[in-house]
Amino acid sequence: MMLDAFLAGAHQVFAFDTLIYMLIGSVAGIVAAAIPGFTVTMAIILTLPLTFTMGPLQGVSVMLSVYVGGYTGGLISAALLGIPGTPSSVATTFDAYPMARGGEPGRALSLGVWSSFFGTVISTIVLILAAPPLAMIAVKLGPWEYFSLIVFALTIVASLVGNSLMRGLIAGVIGLGLATIGPDPMMGQPRLTFDSAILTPGLPFLVVLIGIFAISQLMGEVEDHGKGNSSDALIPDVIEFKTWAVMREVLMHPVNLVRSSLVGVFIGALPGAGGSIANLLAYDQAKRSSKNPEEFGKGNPDGVIASEAGNSATAGGGLIPMIALGIPGSAVDAILMAALMVHGISVGPRLIMDNADLAYGMFVAMVVASLMMLVVCVLSMRLFLRVTDIPKQFIVPTVMICCVIGAFALNNRVTDLYLLGAIGLVGYGLKSIDYPLAPLVLGVILGPIAETNLRRALMSDGDWTVFFTRPISAVLLAAALLSVIFSVRSVLKMRKKDRPATDEQDGD
Amino acid sequence: MFRKIAVAAGLLAAAIAGPAQAQDYPEKPIEFIVPWGPGGGSDTLMRIVAMGLSEVTGQAVPIVNMPGVGGTVGLAEFAKRPADGYTISQIHEGLYTANKLGITELSYKDFIPVALVTSSPQYLVLSKNENFSNLEELKAYAEANPGAVRAGVTLGGVPHLHMAMIEEALGVEFSYVGFRDTGERIRAAVGGNVDIVIGDVASASEFVKNGDLIFAGVGTEERTSEEPDVPTMAEQGYDLSMAVTRGVVLPAGTPDAIVEALDAALEKAMALPDIREKMTNAGSADIYLGHEAYKAYLDKLDGEVDKVVGKLQG
């Protein structure tokens, strides 16, 4: 029975036309994610109408290949340009970019690709083995647990602060403050908008991300122009990929790989969280458990592995509540569900029972999609690296234009472009006075989730003590406390050891 | 003399051009502004409508998602577009609540209703619990324990409106918990984090089949064909109508001929068997109201919303 369904599903996925469409989808996902400003969600929306005319499993397989490709593509611009191609690859910039600049772009890319591949595979294995119980846990979590989780996630700011704990914390607070602009997440009432049409819709998180990272990075490149060599390639001509050697290198870090993937799976399985948090959490965990935390941010392979395995594993994680319960783990999963619904397939807690071939087909499609991503990336890496051969005066304006188009296409709002410009300037300003940018972005991501769940918790039950009496919530709060203690201790230790070097920055 | 001829020729030309214009319409792609994000109810349904409209007219109908502030950002942009029939948009009950709560100045009167194309009947959904398993028991429990029943809604949105209607009809008091969309609410109900929610067939029926949730009543006049065992609210003694109805609108000032042409094209599109099937799959009842009927419907709805809107501000 199970085997029949598995074979039926596999049969559909391995049809020739499905594989061709999946290959196209994979390339499209990688390319869309590699361009800063273009998101995976966007690529999936573009494929949605096309899947209306395909069979249900075929349609979903194609979307999954876009999805998996998209979680990898972001690493390309993260490693080569220092700009996260997607929100999921913020932490990838921290170590992959210094590694690439340090003359090992091939290694940085290969590390990321292999980590992404293993991350996806590990998450798919967890999905197949443990989807129903994990989904049940995810759905039982109430606003109390979510709020406590976000409090815990906020403590990772300490790992992202760079040279100064103080400046890092200030950046985080600025991020939390920016997130309060616009309609409040509960009632939709305007806050801090000063009746201006630009601020009324709020600051979309992606616009902040593109402004803060991409625009400031690009302006930094322009600034460096006078220092010569600007029209030269950033990286030496002879590039070593050592595809297999790097695969072994990734596998030599099994603890980090598995831990990061599991972080990705769990965060992905929580509806509403997702890749943009998982990569940072996985990075934080890797840094804390490393014997040489000071190596992070300077091209440490562990940083690349953690971020890329962590974000790719959210793909399988997000499917857990969707396949087991019919609850989407992310915006992309919601679109996948809509695609299935249009075909008359009700995605719900009975999906595995009623449409077993579809569910197993999706498992097969995940594996096929990750293999395709691997093949496409390995074969085209040389091509991507040509990006670094292009003189800066061409690449900077091109990337800038992509960012602007991407920021507009997000909500099709012209006012978002003014915001993009303003935020870009703020980001550039902060960067020039050595403020780390990652805590700011983390604040913008986490602020609204924290607020929504805090208010929701207090609306459900006016009693504050519930945060401490619900066990999972209490554990998360305790973890947050420990995390703060740990960070303070390590900061004090560092201070004692020596005055910190100047280059311990978050990415650049 | 010469002038008269010119005027006559002009009139004649206008007389020919008028209908001719409508006959030619549409002669280029029609942009469809969906004021909500991708993947939601409006987006999914309107993509199917766009597909049908494109099939009937032979023109592309690209969807442009413009989400923000309860669907009002996209509509504000839409209101500024030329009234030539080449930009269309969609409204639902959410525009009424947003307007009456002061979130937007726009009201349904700022647009020309072309046709109501979908209606998703709304259900009162109970989370599985020990205290009540139908409407009567819910009423009894809520009367005995005022404010103890946690109702999941989108604050200031259509579900809030529907829940307020139920609260008033039952004469009880719920405590409200805010969620962003139907999916979030249903998830909270399945997880037992709220007790009652407003939901629809598309998002909740699988959980009902599985025994996690209970449909306590539907806000339609007659029982729905998808859930024939679920009693209507009216049957249970509460004359409530609860549905999310979505219609296509044009900017004010669009020529009548174009309104009629679009109405005709939409009617044809919504009758295509393939489109009908997809709409049903996406949880919409089989419904079509043309220009006049839709306008009358919206006016009637306005009065109904006015009656309960005071409850939303609390």
Image: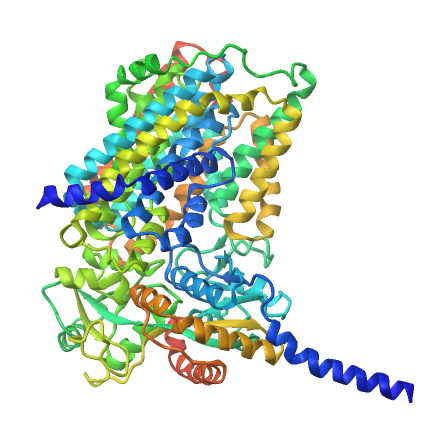
Nearest to the observer: residue A466 or residue B107: B107
Q: In this rendering, is residue B290 above or below B131?
A: below
Whether residue A57 sits left or right of residue B106 in the image: it is left
Q: In this rendering, is residue B121 above or below A140?
A: below
Q: Quadrant of residue B18?
A: bottom right
Where residue B254 appears, x then y in whole percent? 61, 75
Nearest to the observer: residue A417 or residue A231: A231
Whether residue B48 sits left or right of residue A365 in the image: it is right
Where residue A227 appears, x then y in whole percent? 67, 15
Where residue B124 appears, x then y in whole percent? 24, 71
What residue is at 15 percent from the left and 75 percent from the top? Answer: B229
What residue is at 58 percent from the left and 62 percent from the top? Answer: B77
Q: In this rendering, is residue A153 above or below B310?
A: above
Whether residue B21 sits left or right of residue A206 in the image: it is right
The residue positioned farthest toward the right in the image shown = B1
Q: How many numbered marks, from 0 up?
A: 0
What residue is at 54 percent from the left and 14 percent from the top? Answer: A235
Nearest to the observer: residue B235 or residue B34: B34
Residue B223 is at least partly visible in this image? yes
What residue is at 54 percent from the left and 44 percent from the top? Answer: A407
Q: In this rendering, is residue A506 above or below A237?
A: below
Q: Quadrant of residue A489?
A: top left
Q: Coloring scheme of the render?
A: rainbow
Residue A165 is at least partly visible in this image? no
Where residue A496 appears, x then y in whole percent? 39, 12
Nearest to the observer: residue A199 or residue A474: A199
